[in-house]
Image: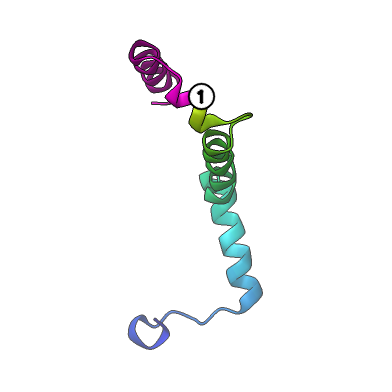
């Protein structure tokens, strides 16, 4: 970009500072990844045996579960 647009080259610490400033100003995607990762972890590593829990549900219970998840998370 320096040769094409004539921007001044910045160093490593300036780029880290710009990155952190961008994180602070936009709410930060790093924090969002940690929060989303926690939700995904809860879904796949539920307390107990999730696989058998799902297969022991009736069709009505499964539909209620899916609808509740849609209301809460979407």
Q: Across the whole image, how many numbered discs are drawn on residues?
A: 1
Identify the image quadrant of residue 5.
Answer: bottom left
Q: Nearer the viewer, residue 44 or 70?
A: 44
Residue 49 in picture, x, y percent from top left: 58, 31
Identify the image quadrant of residue 55.
Answer: top left
Callout 1: SS:
helix
Name the residue located 38 percent from the left edge and 18 percent from the top edge. 62
Q: Which residue is mark 1?
A: 53
Q: Nearer the viewer, residue 71 or 7?
A: 71
Q: Nearer the viewer, residue 33 or 43?
A: 43
Asked if residue 66 is among those painted magenta in the image, a careful observer would answer yes
Q: Residues within 10 Å of mark 1 (few under 14, many from 20)?
A: few
28 left or right of 47 in image: left
Residue 17 in picture, x, y percent from top left: 63, 64
Asked if residue 11 is among those painted magenta in the image, a careful observer would answer no
20 versus 72 height, above or below:
below
Give the magenta range: 53-74
Residue 9 in picture, x, y percent from top left: 51, 82
Quadrant in which the N terminus is drawn: bottom left
Quadrant in which the C terminus is drawn: top left
């Amino acid at each position: 970009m320096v040769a094409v647009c004539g921007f001044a080259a910045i160093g490593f610490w300036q780029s880290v500072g710009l990155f952190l400033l961008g994180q602070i100003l936009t709410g930060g995607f790093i924090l969002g990844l940690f929060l989303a990762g926690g939700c995904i972890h809860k879904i796949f590593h539920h307390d107990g045996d999730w696989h058998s829990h799902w297969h022991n549900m009736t069709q009505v219970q499964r539909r209620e579960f899916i609808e509740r998840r849609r209301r809460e998370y979407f």
